[in-house]
């Protein structure tokens, strides 16, 4: 208890004491007003708005210290009108306990001894309101991102530069005209024929080409074998002597090429794409060819003479057959030039030459073929062209000369 000073009357002392107590309680009531709620449940609901007067609505965040909830001065707040201090939905402000003062001078208490640091009304304004999206919204966004189809990984084209590619090409030249001669010893036979005569004289014809490619390096085997046979008769009368001369000739020729080649220029095509390749046409390339050529030649001549004297009934027959066989090897060089004008069509020109007088005198053989490849399926092409061919070979008592030209037909299987 405080002791009354001796020089003060009881009434003056009580009035000063009540005034001091009022000064202590009024700021605490202003800082921590008691909310009058209709029911306890409603009073416990956290609110964000406190109305201090008819002119001011303030948003209060729980992150703001209770000390900053005070106004600048008590005279701006109508203490008599409690409705101006609190709304029914307002949240009660936390009650702040006054700290005991350490003033030992208990003789006089005045309002000046109880001061509050002035605070601007603008201190109640919050710079920004921190909001966080609801958890359900985050889950929905994550599900939407996971539900979106992921782009398929880009598949790189397989590198088949080291893979092997094979071509099997059966073909057939169709001679429109044939010219040649066969000489064995002192006997010789010349021949010339068109397509019909060639087909009559042809006994066997097999032609094929095989190519194996790895990257740009290729290995080539080309083989052909053909057999022709023909006969001729002539009759003459010399007075009473009648002569019948029959001459026949046959030959079998085989040509076997073994060569290597190298692809230069635009990439080679080994299959027909399913969709347009969108290449920049024309695609140009060249393939030099170097190798050896093996030739085989079997030739024979048959001669028969019949003499008849009609009056004396004399009849004599003479028959003689001569034949030769030879096999020789000679160098061969050539090249193939191609222009691909579209995905399914390629134009090409191929030529080669061999012999060069090394295995006989004379000894020269050459081919020139021009044509086109037309893809009829992803792995098959048709070949249409025209071929010129000639061989001129001689050795000792044997010589052979043969030339023809005509269409060139074939098919290529790629695998």
Image: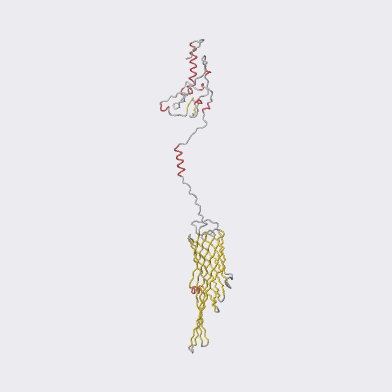
x, y (%) of residue 329? 55, 69
Instruction: Tell which of 213 and 309 is nearer to you.
Output: 213
> Eyeballing the image, is 297 above or below 7?
below
Residue 123 on image: x %, y %: 53, 27
Q: Is residue 282 left or right of residue 32?
A: right
- In this rendering, is residue 151 above or below 120? below
Residue at the limit of the structure toward the bottom, as seen here: 312
Q: Name above or below for residue 15 compared with residue 209.
A: above
Q: Position of residue 45 (x, y in %)?
A: 43, 29
In the image shown, does 79 or 251 lie closer to the viewer?
A: 251
Q: Nearer the viewer, residue 81 or 266?
A: 266
The image shows a total of numbered marks equal to 0
| Residue 246 spot, x, y in % from top left | 50, 80
- What colour scheme does the image use? secondary structure
Question: Viewer-proximal residue, 345 or 38?
Answer: 345
């Amino acid at each position: 208890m405080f002791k009354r000073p001796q020089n003060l009357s009881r009434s003056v002392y009580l009035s000063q004491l009540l005034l001091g107590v009022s000064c202590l309680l009024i700021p605490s009531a202003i800082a921590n007003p008691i909310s009058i709620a209709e029911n306890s449940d409603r009073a416990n609901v956290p609110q964000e708005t406190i109305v201090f007067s008819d002119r001011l609505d303030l948003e209060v965040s729980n992150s703001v210290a209770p000390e900053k909830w005070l106004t600048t001065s008590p005279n701006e707040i109508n203490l008599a009108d409690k409705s101006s201090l609190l709304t029914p939905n307002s949240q009660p402000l936390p009650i702040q306990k006054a700290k005991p003062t350490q003033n030992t001078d208990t003789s006089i208490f005045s309002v000046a001894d109880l001061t509050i640091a002035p605070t601007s009304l603008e201190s109640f304004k919050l710079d920004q309101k921190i909001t966080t999206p609801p958890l359900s919204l985050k889950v929905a966004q994550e599900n939407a991102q996971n539900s979106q189809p992921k782009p398929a990984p880009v598949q790189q084209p397989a590198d088949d530069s080291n893979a092997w590619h094979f071509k099997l090409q059966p073909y057939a030249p169709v001679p429109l005209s044939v010219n040649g001669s066969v000489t064995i010893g002192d006997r010789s036979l010349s021949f010339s024929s068109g397509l019909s005569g060639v087909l009559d004289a042809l006994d066997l014809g097999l032609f094929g080409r095989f190519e194996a490619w790895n990257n740009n390096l290729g290995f080539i085997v080309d083989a052909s074998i053909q057999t022709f046979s023909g006969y001729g008769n002539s009759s003459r009368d010399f007075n009473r002597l009648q002569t019948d001369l029959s001459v026949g000739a046959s030959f079998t020729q085989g040509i076997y090429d073994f060569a290597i080649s190298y692809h230069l220029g635009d990439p080679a095509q080994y299959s027909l794409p399913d969709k347009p390749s969108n290449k920049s046409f024309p695609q140009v390339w060249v393939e030099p060819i170097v190798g050896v050529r093996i030739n085989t030649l079997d030739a024979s001549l048959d001669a028969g003479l019949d003499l008849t004297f009609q009056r004396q009934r004399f009849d004599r027959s003479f028959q003689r057959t001569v034949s030769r066989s030879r096999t020789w090897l000679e160098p061969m060089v050539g090249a193939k030039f191609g222009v691909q004008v579209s995905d399914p069509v390629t134009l090409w020109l191929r030529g080669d030459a061999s012999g060069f007088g090394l295995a006989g005198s004379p000894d020269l053989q050459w081919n020139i073929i021009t044509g086109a490849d037309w893809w009829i399926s992803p792995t098959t092409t048709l070949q249409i062209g025209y071929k010129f061919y000639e061989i001129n070979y001689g050795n000792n008592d044997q010589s052979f000369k043969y030339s023809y030209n005509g269409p060139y037909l074939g098919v290529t299987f790629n695998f």
